[in-house]
Image (cartoon, helix red, strand yellow):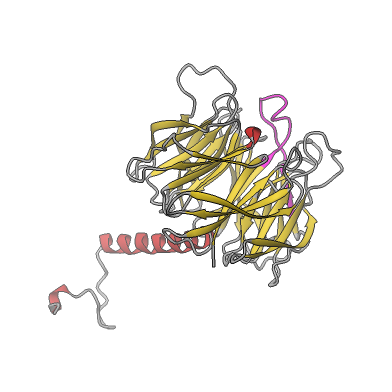
Amino acid sequence: MMSERGRISRSAGDLRPFPLKLIRWIKRFSFILSVVAVNACTQEPGAPAGGVYNLLVGTYTGGGSEGIYIYRFDSSTGSVTSVSSAKAENPSYLVTSRDGRFVYAVNELPGDSGPASRRGSISAFGFDAGTGTLTFLNRVSAEGNDPCYLSLSPDGKYLVSANYSVAADPGGSFSVFPLAADGRVGAAVQTVRHQGRGPVRGRQDSAHVHSAVFSPDGRSLFVQDLGADRIFEYRYAPDGDRRIFTPADPRDVPTTPGSGPRHLVFSIDGRFAYVTNELDASVGVYRYRDGRLTPIETVSMSEPGFKGKVGAAAIHLSPDGRFLYASNRGDANEIVIYAVDADNGRLTLIGRQPSLGRTPREFLIDPSGRWLIAGNQDSDSVVVFRRDVATGKLDPDATTVPVGKPVDFKLVPVR
């Protein structure tokens, strides 16, 4: 039984202040709990530490691919078995609802050679996790060109698309779509267009929005603009009147000129953020506090003396947050592996794993942490690497599955 001296509860009449250290600890613990709650919502639905999953693969269509492909993935063995497919135009990025009943896909159009007047779109599907089949629900305009990324708001009310826009007109933007109870996506209720450019001719002649990621507390949206060399921040007001997102003050965080910020991921505890910079193949490390990002360091993804083409793409943390992985395309064609310092967020390079193909783009690490699944867009292959949970390294003796132009992956538990 705890002694009276050891108790920290107080009577209503005791107005003595709590020790400062205890107050700070309580605040920190409360913040971590809120981050864990949001992260639990933003992970794949019902993500247990093992089991059998539906592996959804988004692709670029044409050249042998028809749309979205569904496989059974067994996390105890790493085996992948074909189940079904659904036709869709360039479903290059996918997101699932929290309960796994619905799947949303970009239709990345018009692309490099299409007319700038043509807008991309967003498609909604019903998903049967038991049979692994998709049923088309509806499709709406993205209100921008070349949508390439989707985020689901923490409350599940809205879907946000990042519209890259190859063409300078209309330029990069992000759009906001309400979601109905039956899974259908509504017409955009807000579109925010960016302005800006960077020093890399041909790639930064105008704004190019590449991703939009919610903050750990769900109150802000961070938008990575490859063309403008900026990370823009917006405040989220779900009950707003057609202005669901409003610019923060200050509005943006500049990045190194010519770096081209692409994707962002927050650390498990929400104290740090990591950004892949596509054009110079680097990872930016930021401290996240009170709604703001503060630069800590930038590390190169390239080997010393490397002279070939580069193109940083996806970035993900291991489930325990101890290791960070980033894909590098161009002539590198590899997954770069870093150890994460939990105290200061800094990165230490621990290895490089060739992707066993050309143009690795997106990848995922399963909830058990034992497997990393990557897609090689230009060699039509999905590669399943065994991952060492203790060291973070990948086993080069991997399994390859033929898939036409794979570029994105999501897991939904089989029910």
Residue at figure coordinates x 72%, y 39% from the top left? 195
Snapshot quadrant of residue 13: bottom left
| Apparent side of residue 321 relative to residue 328 in the rendered image (left or right) | left
In the rendered picture of this protein, how many numbered marks are placed on residues?
Answer: 0
Q: Which residue occupies the foreground of this view, 152 or 10?
A: 152
Name the main secondary structure of what is drawn in magenta: loop
| Apparent side of residue 55 relative to residue 59 in the rendered image (left or right) | left
Q: Which residue occupies the foreground of this view, 383 or 1?
A: 383
Q: Is residue 359 visible?
A: yes
Q: Vertically, is 391 above or below 93? A: above
Residue at figure coordinates x 36%, y 59% from the top left? 28
Residue at figure coordinates x 74%, y 57% from the top left? 123
34 in the magenta segment: no
The quadrant of the image that shows the N terminus is: bottom left
Residue at figure coordinates x 71%, y 24% from the top left? 201
x then y, percent, for residue 156? 61, 65
Q: Which residue occupies the foreground of this view, 130 or 233?
A: 130
Q: Which residue occupies the foreground of this view, 170 or 55?
A: 55
x then y, percent, for residue 118? 85, 44
x then y, percent, for residue 241? 72, 66
x then y, percent, for residue 288? 46, 48
Q: Vertically, is 295 above or below 135? A: above
193 in the magenta segment: yes
Tell me where the magenta segment starts and ends, as one range. Answer: 191-209
